[in-house]
Amino acid sequence: MANDFLFAEEPEEVVHVSRGSWKVLIVDDEPEVHAVTKLALSDFSFQGKHLEFISAYSGREAREMLAKHTDAAIVLLDVVMETDDAGLLVARYIREELHNHYVRIILRTGQPGQAPERQVIVNYDINDYKSKTELTAQKLFTVVMSSLRSYRDILAIDHSRQGLEKIITASADLFSAHSMEQFIDGVLQQLTSILGCNDNALLVTSSLVAGNINEDADPERLVVFAGLGQFEHQEGKQISDVLEPPLLDAFHQALNSRSIVYRDNYLVAYCTSKFTSGSLLYVSGLPNQMTDTQKRLIELFSQNVQIAYENVQLQSEIEDTQREIVYRLSEAVEHRSIETGNHVKRVAFICYDLAKAYGLPEEEAEKLMFASPLHDVGKVGIPDGILNKPMKLHGQEWEVMKTHASIGYEILKNSKRTIIQAGAIIAQDHHEKWDGSGYPNGKKGEDIHIYGRIAALADVYDALRHRRCYKSAWTLEQVMEKISSESGKHFDPKLVEIFKSRVDKLEAILQKYPDDEDR
């Protein structure tokens, strides 16, 4: 009864402090051991966090608790429970089945002869082995403190490794929108690991891509660009929806002073570079005393992270400029042939839709979309009299017109830019036919580049559905019948089937980008 009373009086519910707690799993079949352990460590504190005790009274129950509490820092593990080796089996379960190599395992036994220390240390991946009779309150305090320090350092090393992995992975393609977010996530993870704080961190800008914050910015309207911990998956949200109101004052102060603001256990840093201002960094869970080295690290991060934004912005500008030049050049060619409107834009979107449905990767589909407007660039070399003749071309006229495919290829082929290179392929192959009867090289079947096969179908579909100087617009039914009849002749049969299954979506593209006469 005394034991039951003692155990019943021990509060199972742990009072959490604001900075979190270290989880300690006590595994022992004697309730008194649980009670005495909790009493001896009741005022324990390490790095501003107290202990959270979890109790298990058998090996089976320990397995359940360990699977549930994967973030346990220490296991105080009895050896002899329901079986003589129950504790040893739990230790093996932790390392070999859960693959948890972080938690510190301290074996405690009241019967050392049952499990000789040397044999246990050699055969099981444990971190300490103690006889219950030697574990005084002071020694228990010491072993828990040393174990927590080891656990903290192991986590710091692992977090640093994960952050470095993200940075290395992202560095291969740093300037794409997605990998930039991954890169910033990795840098934040490295930063929080080195500072020895928790994983709650975020980077705030005035927009989702390389935003530029100035002194007139309203902190409450800034948005999250990247976040860790409780801020993960919060990208795009305004910080007024993510942070508690008192924290916004620190953002105001950092923005107005253009400096780093330290508050209690968190900071807000104004990030800038020699070119522009740009973002705000928030990190919580800081150590009680920030060292000069840690503060210098924050300053370096604040000074340099914005440079990464500017590089992304510059890369984006270059890519946008390249794409705009492609479109404007292509539209200039279309104006020559009195085919004003949105032909090149429609063909681009149709090509993208067909490419994705065909199974091309996103990168390839986008490349085709951006390059397809160049399919008829060779028409700049065709005389106006032939290009704009309001009737069918005959004899030598048709031979001249066919040269536009080769002319386009020759204009584009020597470019080192991937989009222009793709444009050269499309210009040359978009008049080839599946059965080999096309031009300029009489290619057949899959010898025709997939870009050319897709562009051919997109170009013919759009041309038939709109008026040209030599014909009226066809109805959808007429176009469907024509394209179906050309399956295996003019067009790749697989593409024709995809076209027929997606024609409603393709028609929506035509309606969204009509020619001037259709408005």
Image (cartoon, rainbow, N blue to C red):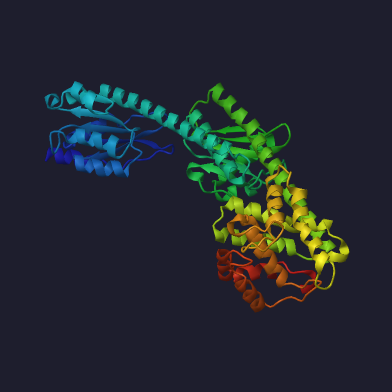
**Viewer-nearest residue: 176 or 388:** 388
Horizontal arrangement in the rendering, residue 71 relative to residue 339 (left or right): left
**Where is the C terminus found, in terms of image quarters?**
bottom right
Q: Tell me the quarter of the image containing the N terminus.
A: top left
At which x and y percent is residue 372?
69, 56
Q: Residue at x 69, y 38 (%)?
A: 310
Q: Is residue 146 above or below residue 387?
A: above
User: Residue drawn 78% across and 56% down?
Assistant: 378
Question: Which residue occupies the extreme front position in the image?
Answer: 395
Q: How many marks?
A: 0
Q: Nearer the viewer, residue 259 or 223?
A: 223
Quarter-of-image position of residue 140: top left
Q: Position of residue 375 (x, y in %)?
A: 72, 57
Answer with the quarter of the image where residue 443 lies.
Answer: bottom right
Q: Can residue 212 be spotted in the picture?
A: no
Q: Residue drawn 42% across and 29% down?
A: 47
- Where residue 134 sits, quadrant-wise, is top left
Of residues 108 and 469, the one nearer the viewer is: 469
Query: At which x and y percent is residue 320?
Result: 72, 49
Task: Tell me where residue 340 appears, x and y as whole percent.
Answer: 81, 65
- Comparing 517 with 296, the one in front is 517
Q: Is residue 138 left or right of residue 280?
A: left
Report whether residue 7 is seen.
yes
